[in-house]
Amino acid sequence: MILITGGVYQHKLDFVYKNFKLEKDDICFTDIDLNWNNKKVIYKFNDIIKKWHNEGLNPEENILNIVESLRDKIIVIDQTGCGVVPVDEKERVLREITGRTCCILAKAADEVYNVMFGLGVKIKG
């Protein structure tokens, strides 16, 4: 698994296209479809974490249950721990859950990149 993280609007998807020679058909866009079985990339995985949380599921347990099935994927997730802390308690809780879930993904990943301004720095692998 390859994990790519970074702030919102940091051109993580451009980094994926350029560095992994992929096309739009290779990507599962989580705002449109959650069927990533035949896709190489899961884009905006934090949307999945939010969906699980809103459905009353535990994202940390869910990710542990599916992490092996993600071995051949590139996971793109927004880094939520930077910036202004949300006033809304529910948003703060989701932010914390997303961070902990991302830590599980990073631990399981073979490679981890942090992308800023479209430039990726390999921080694992």
Image: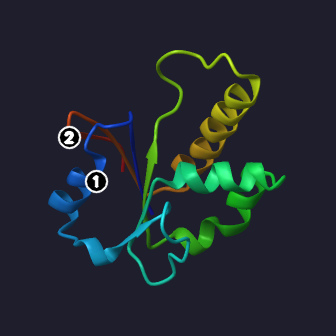
Question: Up-down: is 72 above or below 115?
Answer: below
- Percent across and percent down for residue 33 are 51, 71
Left or right: 82, with 96 as reference point: left
Task: Find disc 2 in the rendering and name its residue.
Answer: 118
The residue drawn where x is 53% and y is 26% is 81
Instruction: Find residue 82 and report its horizontal and vertical position in percent.
Output: 48, 22
Q: Position of residue 19 (x, y in %)?
A: 18, 58
Mark 1 residue type: Leu
Q: Amino acid at mark 2?
A: Gly
Q: In the image, is residue 47 above or below residue 36? A: above
Q: Residue furthest right?
A: 56
User: Residue 119 has which mark?
Assistant: none
Image coordinates of residue 16 in percent, x first then y, are 25, 57
Q: CA distance from mark 1 to mark 2?
A: 8 Å
**Nearer to me, 106 or 39:** 39
Quadrant occupied by the N terminus: bottom left
Query: Is residue 15 or residue 88 the one in the foreground?
Result: 88
Disc with the residue nearer the chain's start (1 vs 2)? 1
**Rendered image: mark on residue 13:** 1
Query: What residue appears at the point 55 percent right and 71 percent down from the top-left corner?
Result: 34
